Amino acid sequence: MHMDGLPENNTVAIAGKIVEECVFSHEVYGEGFYTFKIASERLSDQADILPITVSERLIDKNQLKKDICVDVLGQLRSYNNYNSKKNRLVLTIFAREIHILAEDEKKSENQIFLNGFICKEPIYRKTPFGREISDILVAVNRAYNKSDYIPCIVWGRNARYIANLLIGSNIKVWGRVQSRTYQKKMGDEIEERIAYEVSVSKIEIPHADEKTLIVEKFTEE
């Protein structure tokens, strides 16, 4: 599967090996939804462990066993988790198509395209090694007056450019979905958590000027 020619403003194409089997997530109007996790390999030996949500109408959940490789086309969606004392933004890849891959079909794919609006002031910073980074939150419109809020990381000179954009600016981004572990102090205890975000490799600011911003390519590993 690939994203070429798709008019969606939020499209993910990803392939990987199932590392956590299906569990029931929720039900909407009698339709059951399940979640599982896949490992999407990077160019290095690392892998992103990413959550997938799939309808029972798309595939028999019993087929989604550990170590099976799947190819998924869908959208990166967000929702609020009210189970904890503090409201948390949760991300998942919502499958619209899913296929089980045979041994000779195994591949490594992780692509995302978003067309949305900056909804929070960008945060510009530098790593201890001097690498420039901007954190942005992109709101992507969905049907029925809903929106998905997607955290994105932009690198290099693009990070410097993005840092000056205003809230409400339209932006198109291409990149990959990645996972990142971090530690959060909860009282006297340290809790390990996983964050999901888009690592941006290409950006475009529609109608900003006659020229599209030239993109800095990078290797994230």
Image (spheres, rainbow, N blue to C red):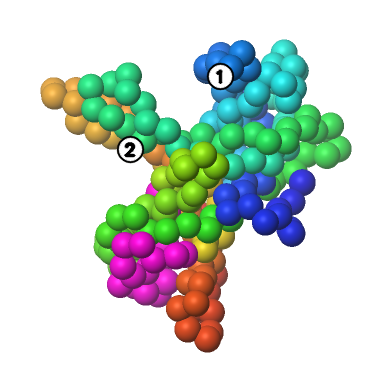
Q: Is residue 36 above or below residue 13?
A: above
User: In this figure, which residue is indicated by the disc labeled 2?
Assistant: 182
Q: Is residue 40 above or below residue 156?
A: above
Extreme residue toward the left, this view:
188
Q: Could you tell me residue 215's position as x and y percent?
A: 52, 74
Quadrant of the rendered structure where residue 66 is?
top right
Kind of residue indicated by mark 2: Tyr
User: In this figure, which residue is indicated by the disc labeled 1?
Assistant: 28
Residue 49 is marked as none
Name the residue at 56% across, 60% down.
174
User: Over which residues does the magenta segment extend?
Assistant: 151-171
Which is in the foreground here, disc 2 or disc 1? Answer: 1
Q: Is residue 154 above or below residue 94?
A: below
Name the residue at 57% across, 23% down.
35
**Counting other residues with Cα less than 10 Å from the Cα at mark 2, is it few (<14), some (14-19), or many (20 or more)?**
few
Q: Horizontally, is 96 left or right of 142 in the view? A: right
Quadrant of the rendered structure where residue 84 is?
top left
Query: 209 and 220: which one is in front?
Result: 209
Q: Secondary structure at mark 1?
A: strand
User: Is residue 32 within the magenta segment?
Assistant: no
Query: 6 and 109: which one is in front?
Result: 6
